[in-house]
Image (spheres, coloured by chain):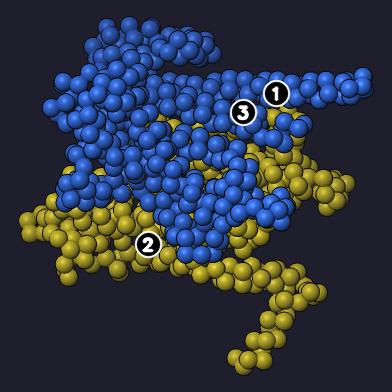
Chain colours: A blue, B yellow
Amino acid sequence: MSVAENQAAAGRGSARAVAILSSLGRFLVVAVTTYLGLLAVTFFIGRVIPIDPVLAVLGDRAPTAVVERTRREMGLDLPWIEQFYLYVKAALRGDFGTSVLTTNPVMSDIRRVFPATIELATLGTIIGAVIGVPLGVLAAVKRGSLIDQIARVVGLIGYSVPIFWLGLLGLVLFYAKLQWIAFPARLDVVYEYTFTPITGFYLLDAAIQGQWDVFHDAWRHIVLPAALLGYLSLAYISRMTRSFMLNELAQEYIVAARAKGLSERRIIWGHALRNAAVPMVTVIALSYANLLEGSVLTETVFSWPGIGLYITNSLQNADMNAVLGGTIAIGSVFIAINLLSDLLYRLLDPRTKAG
Amino acid sequence: MSAETIQSRREWLLSDRPASRLQARLGRAYVAWRRFSANRLALVGMLIIIALVAVAALADVLAPYSATVGDLKNARLLAPSAAHWFGTDDLGRDIYSRIVYGARWTLYVVILVAIIAAPIGLLVGTVAGYAGGWTDTILMRITDIFLAFPKLVLALAFVAALGPGIENAVLAIAITSWPPYARIARAETLTVRNSDYIKAVQLMGASPFRIVLRHIMPLCISSLIIRVTLDMAGIILTAAGLGFLGLGAQPPLPEWGAMIASGRRFILDQWWVAAAPGAAILIVSLGFNLLGDGLRDALDPRSGDQ
């Protein structure tokens, strides 16, 4: 290799390094400002909107001494900017105050309930991706055919249906009438007290411990809510997959592959889908984030003891610390997934590699 | 009207050389309408929305019973029948009548959210796009921050602080739904910012305020309308979700989400109490989605089949 070529190669290498560093730097700036923005909004909701934030936290039946102490503890005698500084510092330590309803620190409550939500959303996303991606691919390949129409209708209904209502109808049909699934909860009462979870993901825990009766029971409880969330993500994933695939199938490399005599199957699943994979990873990640949020309504319907149910229960008891702590928890994960998938897209996309 | 006059009118509308501004506008509207009406599903969506508006307007005529006062003694939790098409609820109220009146609240929510959120987005987007520089960076950073938030959870927290009620639910949804409009308005502004006609207006001494208000905002309206229509279904679902959680409309308002919540207690035995309002939500959301898709394809052919 000549000197000039060497220099050119080094130049390309460092250009790529600069590109990676700049997208990492951008990622950090965006992550920090977005998280601060989330804290600013929850601060605004918790401290500025209520006429008396102490009242909002304690309720109207607290004794005067407690009210005074809480007022000082919350730093309400300080200027706003200082209050916000303290608020951010506490939030970074994971200190969201104490829940009035459970009397525990909000953070320990969240740690206890979050695995249930993660388990539900993960299973939902798996269902959505496993069915949604092939459905979207088929709809794109056989454009205008019956399967394309079906995919379209399935997607449209998924975008239009109130999930909590579909959950209630599902309970009537599969629990009350057909008795295929168990009642709304995470486990049967028998197992609630005998089963000791390790990770908090019951399906996984039961499998690790080899307790297949518990696994079966947990499955019977999770299957309907997970299928519903799966349907929501399926609607989104299949629609996006279809549009990505149509885009890829119109490219010239597909014509070239056909001219070389590759089989249709290889062209579609090997070439086109592979090139659509990067944006699809983003779509699946985003749909996962949406399911975390969508779990609020689903968990309420299925009495699923996750963070959604925690937030709604706290809402009904005017427990603002818990509501805002839960909002920050879901918000943080939501933001993290959003930004990470964006970063991943930039790093994985071959076009950004070249530049 | 004879076939010939229809033919000549069509030619007048489709003329390549319109003689007046009115003719040009009507011609463009006609072309858009032809594209739109070629899409059957979009027409179905439009019919659903027209039906929704009609039901809301004629609720007093269409509803055979009161929406808020029931017959507790004789008509509690009756199954669907000729007298009560969708049955009655636990307070002996006719569910069909409540759904008819509920159409008013659904319209109330979507219209209010649209007229609060769309102008905020329009203002932020056009100002950011026209001003550029630091103003643009800061405004768009704020927009992106709001865009990265989980909407439903944030709306929940807002309502929790503001107190339950349909007005507060509207406010909470509006606060969380303006960012996409700002993005769209900014993108449209950037495409026209450096065009000759804006330069001409600048040379004539128009103030930036006037340029944004009179010459940029009107151009953003059509893409904004498409996006708002597509978002309507999401707004309805969020409002219904808040109602279901007891944070939106309060009893005895016949809001569909709250009706599902009250039917939840009887879901295993008297399923119809929750079934009918949910079906109403599904149909109306579907209508807005179909209409929005159709409008997008008709008015914005670029995005075509996405």
- Which residue extends farthest left? B73
Quadrant where the C terminus of chain B sits is: bottom right
**Height in image: B133 above or below B30?**
above
Amino acid type shown at disc 1? Ile
Residue identifier under label 3:
A343
Tell me the distance, in whole angstroms, between the alpha carbons under discs 2 and 1. Answer: 56 Å
What is the number of the mark on residue B56? 2
Task: State left or right for residue B255 relative to residue B303.
Answer: left
- The chain letter under disc 2 is B
Disc 3, SS? helix
Disc 1, SS? helix
Residue B202: which quarter of the image?
A: top right
Tag 2 and tag 1, C-beta contact below 8 Å: no
Whole-percent x and y of residue A42?
45, 24
Tell me the distance, in whole angstroms, between the alpha carbons under discs 3 and 1. Answer: 10 Å
Name the residue: 27% across, 7% down: A65
Residue identifier under label 1:
A20
Task: State left or right for residue B150 relative to residue B304.
Answer: left
Amino acid type shown at disc 3? Leu
Nearer to me, B74 or A215: A215
**Height in image: A305 above or below A73?**
below
Residue A207 visible to the viewer: yes
Nearer to me, B109 or A147: A147
Name the residue: 45% across, 35% down: A288
Nearer to me, B186 or B58: B186
